[in-house]
Amino acid sequence: MVKKLIIAEKPSAAKAIAEFFKCKKYDKFSYRDERSGLVVVNLLGHILELSPADGYCERYSKWDIEDLPIIPRKFKLIPKKGSEALISYIGKLLQRCSEVCVATDPDRQGVLLGYEVLDYLNYTGKVTRAEPRNLDNIGLKRCFENERAFCSKYLNIYNAARAQRDSDWLYGINITRALTVVNQEKVDSPIYSGRVQTAILELINLNEEKLKNFIPKSYYTLELILKDQDLVLNFKPSEDELKILSPVSISFDSDKSLAYIKNIKAKIDSSEFVKIKNKNIKLKKICPPTGYSLTKLQKDAYKHLSITPNETTKIAQKLYEDYKITSYPRTDSVSFPLSQYGDREIIVNNIFKSLNLNNLDKCNLNMGIKRDIWNDDDGSSHHAIVPTLNYINDRIKLNRNEYEIYKLICINYLMQFMDDYLYESVIIESQIDKFSFTASGKTIKNKGWTILSNSKIEEILIPHVNVGDLCKLNKIRVKKLLTKKPASLNLASLLDLMENAWRLIDPKNKELIKLIKSEKCGIGTEATRSGHIDKLMKRGLITTKGKVSLTKLSRCTHKIAPIKLKNPMTTSNWEYELKKVECGQLNYNQFMKSTIDELIGITGDIKNGMYTLSGTTFKKSSCPSCSGIIELNNYWSCKNCLKQFYNDNGNIGYEKITLPCENCGSKNLNRYKNKKNQSFFYKCEKCNIVIPSYEEKPLFVKEKYSCLECRSKLAITVSKSRVLYWRCTNVKCSFTCSDDNKKPVTHTRG
């Protein structure tokens, strides 16, 4: 008898939940406890998907402009390829159980994953919801203690997820088909368009336009150089003077700015002394950085470690699911969980066990500190990414990138128990005639949490002067300055723009800015932003070498993207409407009606010729192996020799090679190229083993050897000069030794 069925999102989550409830492995899909009647089953992420267009009508298999827009009366779900057996298995369990607990990820997509399966299988029994944020035992205990009955809250979230899924399908299918068919004489591959990806392309396009149209402006200021104090005072213009002198002013003119500054200089040129009018000294503090949301972690990982956002997402998910050493990663919250404040000393001790923190002693920490950032009421259903009560032990072997991401999360956590960064701000004010001049300095009083920061903090020392001092003038100088060129977008700054779309709103519209900012309505969500960027890269629409830029293809096709979709605020407003559905202020049908009305208007404009390419045509590339026709989807695929090649920012990259894995026997051993040294290596997607490439073949070594210093596993490696050597896999250990016919010269058998 199956009394209760728990549905987890992935096999790793199901295993953790099963271990918590002491369920035993029953078959390849489930764990069971025969005495209690508890069964834990896993999904495989999305095991259902919306039917393609030809699933509603056979004629939709051909792209015909007259059929658009395609708007199904009711959206049909079908099993994803390879998921049929799992869906049938869950269906049989649902017929026998009296209660179902949906324990998928605690976000909108997690709710959708679980409840769409129940809907598809027509389950009408009792349903509860559990939201696992940590997969360690303490986290799961708290999760299932707070298990709740399915109520309007979760129904609203489910409807919001359905609305997002269905409207994305409508826009993707219809607008891509419409643009492609209207321009079919110019292109022979699809012109992809969708609400999020088109908005991202527009952000990049706007940045490129700024850079292209940038003309440096000269602007001017005055400096007073004091003779004995080695002090420079800068001119402080009034608000009216800023209209003349500031290069961002609408009425700014460089020549008039220079003339005005020269006029002031002429008036004060005869002055020999300057009097110190005021000296303002303030002790200022800066609190530690807030916790890590996924986007914030992605930005820091790219800035400091050069790890791409998509790779950071995968690593963070692995730290959560497989290793259980960090909390749920796809979060938009930067607050720390108040409910876990009591665990802080255990977590900190575990961090010191796990990491090399040579620049920090435990005495630098004050475990009694409790800032306002510790709260469970920041408006999000999640909390920031934090370390769990687990730590790195002999069974957990992190690679270098995993270790560095984990270290970022741990250091951010430790900063919360360190003193504020304190500095003394000094502002000196003086006046000649009616004109004000100032100088400012900064003296560090307590470095506090900045000891662990990657940013450099420098003092700005100024000479000691007192109020009323008459200081002798050495020189009055007109200083010429140039406006700075806007920075090119990189992956971190692109993510920042997507997250903070409110910055694109007219500053005068303060109410809308406040609304969009408070509701965290950006372009995409924490869970999807990096995936959208990655998809644009795979489709050859953007390049990310050094800076993010459009490709020749996207620069041309983006010009004909519908104006409504180009506007980054469209998708931001859409996200705001979805949040209203989540809160019950709007229902599914109301949201979809508005979406469909807009879609009908856009497809009508495309049909009427408003968005057509001119001039350039885009033809298919040829296969580097056989010169056959090659097309780009996720990979460049040749229709003639059937070889596949990786996508290199829209160009044809190296050949994709898949071999049998000698470690696990699966046919999932793929060849990749190391971006840093351009060398090849192999990785099995099933057992995750990483193998170097040597003489164009995977370098398998069946024998296991251990490190003489720390007893961890040794791995055979190929140097830059293509020489074999052995290194310790423990990131804390630096042991290496040379190779002798695929054996370490000095070794101990494991």
Image (tube, grey):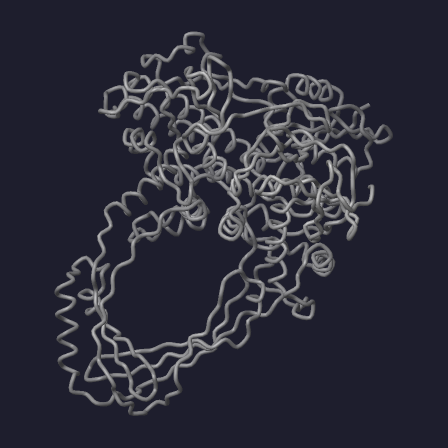
Q: Which picture quadrant has residue 196?
A: top left
- The location of residue 602, given as percent across then percent down, is 31, 26
Measured as percent of width and height from the top left, residue 330 is found at 57, 42
Estimate the x, y position of residue 668 in percent, counting from the top left: 64, 25
Q: At 68% from the left edge and 66% from the top edge, which residue is drawn?
A: 367
| Nearer-the-camera pick, 729 or 110 | 729
Instruction: Give the quarter of the figure containing the C terminus.
Output: top right
Q: Total number of numbered labels? A: 0
On screen, residue 129 versus residue 479, left or right, reads: right
Q: Give x and y (percent) for residue 627.
A: 42, 17
Left or right, 494 with respect to 682, comes to: left
Furthest residue in direction top, as rendered? 58
What residue is at 26 percent from the left and 59 percent from the top?
Answer: 483
The N terminus, quarter of image: top right
Q: Is residue 501 left or right of residue 356?
A: left
Name the residue at the front extreme.
Answer: 740
527, above or below 335, in the image: above
Direction from residue 56 to residue 725 in the image, left or right:
right
The outermost residue toward the right is 35
Q: Nearer the viewer, residue 60 or 34?
A: 60
Res 357 → quadrant: bottom right
Q: Which residue occupies the foreground of this view, 67 or 708?
A: 708
